[in-house]
Amino acid sequence: MSVKTARTRTVSRILATALMASALTGCSLMELTRDCDGTEARVREVGALGILDSRPDRATVTRGAEEDAPHCFADSGDVVVSTTRTYAFPGTRAEVAAHYRTAA
C-alpha cells in the first residue's frame, strides 16, 4: 500500500466519522451559521403585539424597562425573537396570571 493510499483512507475515515457524528447529534454546519439576518419583519411583528402594552392595575414600569425592545439573537444555530416587559407589582402571582389570561 502506498503512502498516498494510506493518507487518502485516513482522511476518508476522518470525514466519515465527522459526518456520522454530525448526523447522530442533530447538528449540522449549516445550522451553526444561522444568524438574525432576515428577521427584521418578525421582530417588528413581535414588538407590535398588543399584549405587551398590557399590565395589571397597580403595576409600575421599573427604571430602565422603557428600553426593553423586541430583538433577535442567535445561539448555536437557534434563532430566537423575543421581548420582555418588566414592572413592579404589589399583588400576587395569581392576580398577574388572571390578568394575562383575560388579556390573551
Image (cartoon, grey):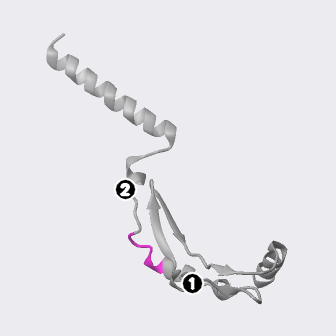
Image location of residue 69, percent across then percent down:
51, 80
Q: Which residues are magenta?
A: 37-42
Q: Is residue 56 magenta?
A: no
Q: Which of disc 2 and disc 1 is earlier in sequence?
A: 2
The disc label shown at residue 33, or none: 2
Q: Which type of secondary structure does the marked residue at label 1 adopt?
A: loop
Look at the picture and state if 28 lies above or below 40: above
Q: Residue at x 15, y 19 (%)?
A: 4
- Where is residue 89? Give x, y as percent: 74, 81
- Disc 2 is placed on an element classified as loop
Which is in the foreground here, disc 1 or disc 2? Answer: 1
Tag 2: amino acid = Thr
Q: State the residue position of label 1.
A: 63
- Dot 1, crowdedness within 10 Å: few (<14), some or many (≥20)? few
User: Which image quadrant is residue 14 in?
Assistant: top left
Residue at point 81% right, 80% down? 91
